[in-house]
Image (cartoon, grey):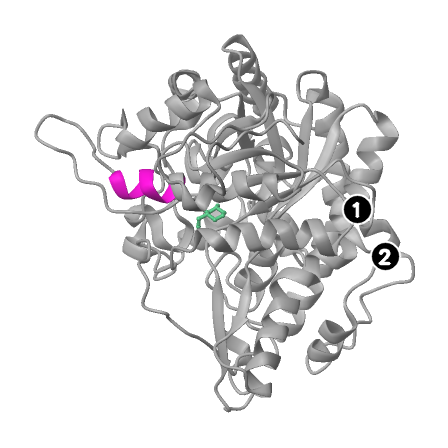
């Protein structure tokens, strides 16, 4: 990657100078099935853990559900038009497993496939390349009833589903991602209980994390055995984790959170083994009987790319409190004594501190500490409360500034040698933000949930200029 030109010195220092990205750089927007599709009972779709969880009283802010969401199932043509208007080269979306295999096993549902056929054809028609994620959290409820991700069989079911879909849709999709953010699936879903399926068992979360990764490895093997010509990868959510002070306890707190959130996934995928210190930390809640000989080799399948989702940095301290007392309600398994410290810098509506430098930190870390692999930012974006002006204009300057600052840092990472090939903004439209329901808006395009009217925000117009010029 040598063809990037940054006029006038390092990107961060020249906010007004043009910053060019390499020719062929991928610019896209991202979404996920349950967050946008709606149509939860149409054409044979089965229930997922998110349907069940969202209908559990008290689980979701405001009692919202994904029953209708952005009605993308019926409005996909309009949404593809929006992507084309953005000048997106690619669209990252996920396939709803319960739409394609309603009970999580057996033959594919023809009507569910029909929807993705239509979506993919529409994208290709508009010259937007599909970038598919096989699993963005909507596990078929029947598989959860059979044990969910803590059960090893779920990894095999996932690989079977992945292969069937790959065979059926592979002719038109070059880029395949197995999982999105396995940390969230495992620890928010099975330990913290704030995501579906809402379970609160730290040992189950550790098992779930492993079976997600095993499912990833088995899926890659199965897909490649069928056809090795497509590009296959996985997406993880990475955070720089810093100690607030230089005490040994704070440094150890940072090490533990880094192991739990970052290295638990990077190491088996890119190095073929879980980190020793993570296994020591988690030994208080798991005997690791679920990790069988050969599993780590399966997880370490050669990949064509790694997807990195980046939102913020974590600054932590050791509270000095007990480590285990609250484990049954904390996603920070074996580290619930760690406090996350606010630095008082500006934050998005999610409360996530805005830290573009952190994107540079995670990209350069993967590049330097792990084996060389093409990287894509598969998600980055910001939730802000948007106000619609009397003229109908949504002047979301804070989102423009957020994206601009992160894009600049990405360009600098490329200059620093990182093999970064593309960038997807989260998200194309406002959508169902999980436990926050519709109260948090990440979209480049505003959704009026009463009318389903789509209105591109100022950030969408700005992004369209970036994609067309391949330049900031
Ligand atoms: O909305 C989510 C997405 O589904 C996964 N990554 C983080 C986003 C913002 O929370």
**Mark sitting earlier along the chain (2/1):** 1
Labelled pair 2, 1 in contact (Cβ < 8 Å)? yes
Q: Position of residue 342 (x, y in %)?
A: 37, 71
Q: Residues within 10 Å of mark 1 (few under 14, many from 20)?
A: many
Measured along the vertical axis of the image, is residue 239 above or below residue 66?
below
Foreground residue among 301 and 344: 344
Residue 394 falls left or right of residue 91: left
Mark 1 lies on residue: 217
Measured along the vertical axis of the image, is residue 247 above or below residue 421?
below
Q: Quadrant of the N terminus?
A: top right
Mark 2 lies on residue: 295
Q: Residue at x 49, y 43 (%)?
A: 10
Q: Residue at x 91, y 57 (%)?
A: 294
Foreground residue among 294 and 6: 6
Q: Residue at x 84, y 39 (%)?
A: 221
Q: Position of residue 133 (x, y in %)?
A: 61, 36
Marks 2 and 1 sit apart, C-alpha to C-alpha, by: 9 Å
Foreground residue among 290 and 366: 366
Q: Residue furthest top?
A: 125
Residue 437 on the magenta segment: no
The answer to which image quadrant residue 323 occupies is: bottom right
In the rendered structure, which segment of residues is drawn in magenta?
A: 397-403
Residue 400 on the magenta segment: yes
Q: Residue at x 80, y 51 (%)?
A: 299
Observer able to see residue 423: yes
Q: Position of residue 153 (x, y in %)?
A: 77, 53
Residue 302 falls left or right of residue 435: right
Q: Secondary structure at mark 2?
A: helix
């Amino acid at each position: 990657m040598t063809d990037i030109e940054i006029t006038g010195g390092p990107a961060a220092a020249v906010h007004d100078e043009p910053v060019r990205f390499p020719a062929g750089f991928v610019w896209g927007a991202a979404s996920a099935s349950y967050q946008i599709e709606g149509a939860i009972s149409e054409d044979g779709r089965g229930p997922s853990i998110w349907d069940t969880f969202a209908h559990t009283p008290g689980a979701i802010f405001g009692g919202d559900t994904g029953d209708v969401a952005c009605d993308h199932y019926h409005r996909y043509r309009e949404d593809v038009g929006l992507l084309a208007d953005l000048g997106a080269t690619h669209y990252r979306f996920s396939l709803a497993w319960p739409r394609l295999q309603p009970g999580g096993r057996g033959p594919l549902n023809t009507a569910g496939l029909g929807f993705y056929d239509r979506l993919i054809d529409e994208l290709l028609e508009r010259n937007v390349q599909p970038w598919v994620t096989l699993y963005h959290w909507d596990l078929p409820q029947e598989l959860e009833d059979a044990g969910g991700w803590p059960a090893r069989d779920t990894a095999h079911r996932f690989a079977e589903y992945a292969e069937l879909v790959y065979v059926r849709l592979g002719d038109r999709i070059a880029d395949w991602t197995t999982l999105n953010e396995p940390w969230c699936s495992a620890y928010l879903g099975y330990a913290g209980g704030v995501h579906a399926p809402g379970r609160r068992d730290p040992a189950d979360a550790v098992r779930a994390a492993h079976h997600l990764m095993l499912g990833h490895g088995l899926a890659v093997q199965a897909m490649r055995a069928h056809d090795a010509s497509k590009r296959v990868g996985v997406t993880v959510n990475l955070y720089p984790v810093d100690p607030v002070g230089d005490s040994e306890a704070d440094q150890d707190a940072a090490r533990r959170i880094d192991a739990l959130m970052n290295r638990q996934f990077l190491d088996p995928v890119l190095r073929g083994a879980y980190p020793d210190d993570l296994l020591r930390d988690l030994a208080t809640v798991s005997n690791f009987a679920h990790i069988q000989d050969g599993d780590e080799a399966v997880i370490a399948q050669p990949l064509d790319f790694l997807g990195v989702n980046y939102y913020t940095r974590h600054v932590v301290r050791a509270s000095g409190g007990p480590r285990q007392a609250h484990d049954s309600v904390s996603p920070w398994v074996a580290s619930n004594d760690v406090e996350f410290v606010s630095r008082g810098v500006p934050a998005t509506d999610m409360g996530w501190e805005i830290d573009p430098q952190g994107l540079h930190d995670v990209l350069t870390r993967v590049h330097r500490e792990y084996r060389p692999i093409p990287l894509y930012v598969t998600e980055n974006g910001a939730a802000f409360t948007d106000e619609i002006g009397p003229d109908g204009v949504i002047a979301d300057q804070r989102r423009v500034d957020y994206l601009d600052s992160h894009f600049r840092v990405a360009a600098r990472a490329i200059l620093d040698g990182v093999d970064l090939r593309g960038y997807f903004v989260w998200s194309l439209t406002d959508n169902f933000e999980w436990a926050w329901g519709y109260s948090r808006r990440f979209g480049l395009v505003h959704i009026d949930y009463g009318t389903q009217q789509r209105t591109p925000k100022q950030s969408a117009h700005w992004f369209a200029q970036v994609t067309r010029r391949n330049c900031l």
